[in-house]
Amino acid sequence: MKYIFLFCTFFAINAFAQKDIKPSATFTVSGLVQTELTFHIGDEGKYKQDSLGDVAIKNHQGDTKYVAKKIKGILLKTFIDSAGIHVDKPKEYSELYVVLTATDGYKNVYSYNELSNSEIGEHIYVLTGEDGKNMSQMDNRIEVMSLGDYNSGRRHLRALVKIEVKKVD
């Protein structure tokens, strides 16, 4: 009886922990920017897109969850640069961070320097295509991947709706 209770409890917790992620069709760039930017699916042609090949998505233990095939994307920092950063003094750039939020509330955080002043920023993409599908056809749209991470699943964000540039208090 004890084992049945534990099994049922485990099953119930897992069932309620799983969420259907509502895909997004638009996201905004706001916060400490010169001009708030809104991106809509269909706008991807306005930006330089890179072909990124196949990418293995790994969980926190380094196990491959799946392989994203033939992906294309736009560098995340392209959208932040397009909105323009608003600071009063150059040293304030080191106090900025960027929060990405999905439709289900999942969040990722990057430092501004990580995105604009390191190799890491050259490998974080908003995906515009996968396995022959364009952005509007992708199930997990609008998706962000950090291709430079060893275990990429931690910062793999699906259904992006908001990018906020903030300053550390």
Image (tube, rainbow, N blue to C red):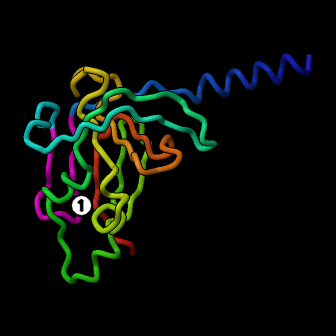
Choose top left, top right, bottom left or bottom right for residue 17.
top right
Q: Is residue 88 above or below residue 98?
A: below
Q: Residue furthest right?
A: 1
Identified at 41% across, 56% down, the residue is: 109
Read off the magenta span: 26-39
Residue lying at the far front of the rendered structure? 53
- 78 over 16 or under it: above or below: below
25 with respect to 34 (left or right): right
Q: Is residue 69 left or right of residue 41?
A: right
Q: Where 92 falls versus 122 (above or below)?
A: below
Q: Residues within 10 Å of mark 1 (few under 14, many from 20)?
A: some
Q: Residue at (42%, 51%) from the top-left corner?
A: 148
How many labels were placed on the picture? 1
Dominant SS of magenta comes to strand
Question: In the structure shown, which secondary structural element does the residue marked by tag 1 occupy?
Answer: strand
Q: Is residue 92 magenta?
A: no
Quadrant the C terminus occupies: bottom left
Q: Nearer the viewer, residue 44 or 83?
A: 44
For mark 1, what is the residue? Answer: 31
Q: x, y (%) of residue 85?
A: 18, 67
| Residue 136 percent across, percent down from the top left | 21, 24
What percent of the width, then of the height, locates residue 92? 28, 79
Quarter occupied by the N terminus = top right
The kind of residue on which mark 1 rests is Gly
Q: Identify the residue at image location x=22%, y=65%.
A: 32
Relative image position of residue 157 (x, y in whole percent): 40, 40
Is 31 contained in the magenta span? yes
Residue, x 51% and y 49% (percent of image)? 150
